[in-house]
Image (tube, rainbow, N blue to C red):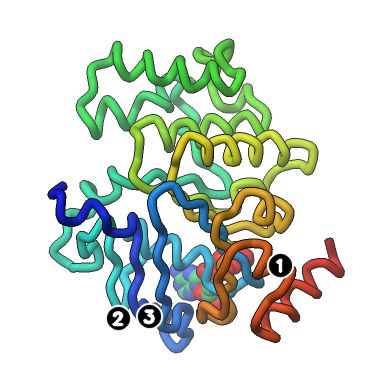
Amino acid sequence: MSDTDSGAPVLSMRGVYKAFGENTVLRGVDLDVHRHQVVVLIGASGSGKSTLLKTVNLLEQIDDGQIFLRGQDISDPRVDVDATRARIGVVFQQFNLFPHLTVLDNVTLANRRVHGMPKDEAERIAVELLGRIGLADKLRSYPDRLSGGQQQRVAIVRAIASSPELLLLDEITSALDPQLVGEVLDLVAGLKSTGSTMVMATHEMSFARRAADLVVFLKNGVLVEQGPPEQVFDDPEHPETREFLARVHAVG
Ligand SMILES: Nc1ncnc2c1ncn2[C@@H]1O[C@H](COP(=O)(O)OP(=O)(O)OP(=O)(O)O)[C@@H](O)[C@H]1O
Ligand SMILES: [Mg+2]
């Protein structure tokens, strides 16, 4: 990485469009995510949150616009997809861990296979991270022996073990029993203090309020409003944001 682009946002989306057939899902999304920022995407089901995250991880190709990772245009069709993905940590709603690998092997895999790290060093990092989240005694366990909350915490640790430039989290608590949600969100909130840069789609508004630096409201693929949580939640500019929040609060 050259010095000239070190001041660039970690992630920059410019005029991003994405359609599935006739269904236009992202309509000119502009978004900047700066270093150490926690950005939370909110919006109704189908508004395009997951699709947005997938375009960043190159799981979906965009139809128009550009996406930059630290100044590099990763939406350029000539980009090295594997090398780009190796710079980004991802955690989804469920099925994150390899069931046939122990917790330790799950967490060390990318560092060893993708980043060519020696086994000792990869294991040292994994043990340290798992210890920090109270799972040091589960190193040799297989995922099916862990609770859903423990599995998601291991998945998060796995995603950060290789110190990615950007972390993408998509509804990581929505498959969990309510009593397990807190431990996973606490871990994510803790990452904020270690300086991770992340974009997280969530329906957990209280978490968004507590942990986000920037809240982004999407409706039908349009980025309607973005701002600090106090602004978006307490004094939203757009009637559509107000409407969405009123509906969420009515059910929550
Ligand atoms: N692979 C796909 N093929 C066709 N349509 C898709 C595909 N993925 C998503 N869509 C459509 O794109 C729209 C946005 O979906 P997306 O999953 O991004 O929404 P979301 O905001 O993440 O919703 P949720 O809160 O339910 O997770 C929806 O209309 C969905 O049906
Ligand atoms: Mg989604």
Name which residue type carries label 2: Asp
- Split into 4 quadrants, where in the image is the C terminus? bottom right
Please report contact status of discs 3 and 2: CB closer than 8 Å, yes or no.
Answer: yes
Give the residue drawn at x 68%, y 76%.
Answer: 236
Q: Quick one: SS at disc 3?
A: strand
Percent coordinates x, y for residue 11 in the rendering: 35, 59
Residue at position x 53%, y 36% in the image? 193
Q: Name the residue at the right extreme.
A: 250
In the shown orientation, is residue 77 left or right of residue 7? left
At which x and y percent is residue 90?
43, 46
- Residue 96 image offset from top left, x and y in percent: 50, 40
The amino acid pointed to by label 3 is Tyr
In the visual, does 183 lie left or right of 13? right
According to the picture, the residue beneath numbered tag 3 turns out to be: 17
Which residue shows up at 33% across the image and 45% down it?
165
**Disc 2 on helix, strand or loop?**
strand
Instruction: Residue 101: give x, y in percent of width and height.
Output: 44, 24
Looking at the image, residue 244 lies above or below residue 186: below
The mark nearer the N terminus, 2 or 1, is 2
Q: Which residue is mark 1?
A: 233
Q: Quadrant of ligand 2?
A: bottom right
